[in-house]
Image (cartoon, helix red, strand yellow):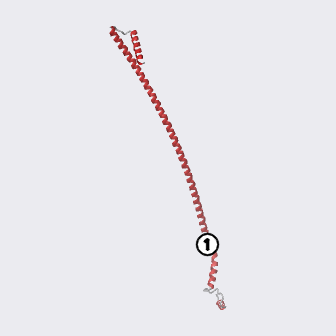
Amino acid sequence: MTPSFALFVSEGGGGFNPLDLSGAGGFFWTLVIFLAALIPIWIIVMGPVTKALLARDAKAAEAIASAEKASRDAESARAAVDSKLREAQLEATKLVDAARGRAEVVERQLKEAAARDAAAMLERAKSEIRGEQERAIATIRREVVDVSLNAAGKVLQRKVDGQDDRRLVEELVTSASKGGRA
């Protein structure tokens, strides 16, 4: 600055002096520098910061949306699992009931088969007993006939063993045994 301009401004008497930094001139230059620096600061600093903040907000919103979707998916999956679990429990109950029913049928069939087998064994045993009884009675009758013929032979003092004699004694023993039973 030239000294004549400084003298002119200072001599003019008491007005605004932009070169005097202690008064209003300091405020003026601060305001000029601020306004001149505002545009580059906004472009260089605030633009990237704003973009970074917007990107962060977008990522946060995306993360929140993703978390909400994951929560909904998890709830849906839990509901599906609960539904499948209920279905599996119902199916298991049906299978157990069906198995129990089949077991009861098999048990009843086994009891019936055992009862039939026991009845058949009892009938066979009775039949065998009757057969053995009839054989024993036939043997006893033969013995009685033989003893009777021997006794008759001793009483008559002759041998009684002819076919007619044997038939006669057998008829007597048979009629006596039938008469004795009835």
| Frontmost residue, 52 versus 159 | 159
The residue closer to the viewer here, 37 or 162, is 162
Q: Is residue 104 above or below residue 71?
A: above
* Residue 160 x %, y %: 36, 9
Residue 149: image x %, image y %? 36, 11
Q: Residue at x 61, y 72 (%)?
A: 46
Measured as percent of width and height from the top left, residue 123 is found at 45, 26
Secondary structure, mark 1, is: helix
Vertical side of 121 occupied by 176: above or below = above
Total tally of numbered discs in the picture: 1
Q: Judge from the rendering whether residue 117 lies leftward or rightward of residue 150; answer left or right.
A: right
As drawn, 57 above or below 41:
above
* Image-quadrant location for residue 140: top left
Residue underneath mark 1: 46
Decide: is 49 above or below 15.
Answer: above
- Dot 1 alpha-carbon crowd within 10 angstroms: few under 14, some 14 to 19, many 20 or more: some
Q: Residue at x 58, y 59 (%)?
A: 68
Q: Residue 66 at what x, y percent from top left?
A: 58, 60
- Image quadrant in which the C terminus is located: top left
Q: Residue at x 48, y 32 (%)?
A: 113
